[in-house]
Amino acid sequence: MLLSERSLGLHEPGWIYELKYDGLRMTAAFGDGAAQFRTRNGASAAKWFPELGDSLSEMGGGPYVTDGEVCVLDDEGRSDFQALQERARHRCWYVGAKPVVYCVFDLLVDRGVDITTQPLMLRKAALARLFGEPPWGILVVKYSDKGGAHLVKQPAHPLGPEAFVAKRRSSIYLPGVRTSEWVKIKRKSRTAREPTLSFKLHRP
């Protein structure tokens, strides 16, 4: 499910706002001792990040399918896309490889049941239950339900996130669809009076 480009009122009700991580979009299928990562195009990426597969394969039950971004994070928790590109270029683990993190934000299959037609907030609740104690290398993406205006009131900071993603609370998951119910909100440099936001397409 892809983001769209459109304006969005920051006071509009019915939305949540997630931190935006800059990584490689991946789905993960796992459970009962096995794990598989796939790219947006459906290519297998299991050998690219074996440490993440090992971590998810320890999860009992299932099967589960999640959506998220594989990232390299710096010491401040910011995405380092250049470092990720170098890691992904090898298509395998290697001595000196940067550690990666799977920043997961959605649950699509829960114990073998397709839940993509359930509202986003029910999927979020199921995701939180699944990763009550996330295994190594798994980060559940945080979100705010206080509205976009709450975000722009925060002082601009060089270590802060570059962007957020607005998602309608009631949105269902439509694989491969560029939906108006998910919108990227990119921070601009703040003015003397107030920070501003602009809207931009999610990078493929």
Image: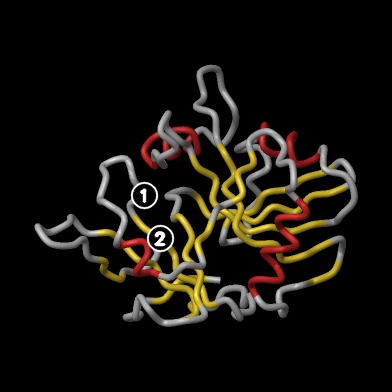
Looking at the image, residue 93 sits to the left or right of residue 33; the answer is: left
Q: On the rendered image, what quadrant is the N terminus found in?
A: bottom right
Which SS class for mark 2? strand
Q: For numbered disc 1, what is the local secondary structure?
A: loop
Picture layout, residue 22 above or below residue 146:
above
The structure's colour scheme is: secondary structure
Residue type, label 2: Phe
- Residue at image position (65%, 71%) is 121
- Residue drawn at point x = 82 percent, y = 37 percent: 58
Marks 2/1: CA–CA distance? 7 Å
Above or below, 204 relative to 170: above
Please tell me the numbered disc located at residue 106. Answer: none
The number of numbered badges drawn on the structure is: 2
Q: Are marks 2 and 1 in contact (CB under 8 Å)?
A: yes
Which residue sits at x=35%, y=66%? 185
Category of crowding for the residue at label 1, using alpha-carbon neighbours closer than 10 angstroms: few (below 14), some (14–19), many (at least 20): some
Please state the horizontal and vertical placement of residue 13, each as a whole percent of the image: 47, 81
Left or right for 14, reference 62? left
Residue drawn at x 46%, y 67% is: 146
Q: Residues within 10 Å of mark 2 (few under 14, many from 20)?
A: many
Q: Locate the C terminus and report the quarter of the image it occupies.
A: bottom left
**Hey, which quadrant is residue 29 in on the image?**
bottom right
Residue 82 image offset from top left, x and y in percent: 36, 38
Residue tagged by mark 1?
161
Q: Is residue 134 above or below residue 15?
A: above
Amino acid tagged 1 = Pro
Q: Identify residue for label 2.
A: 164
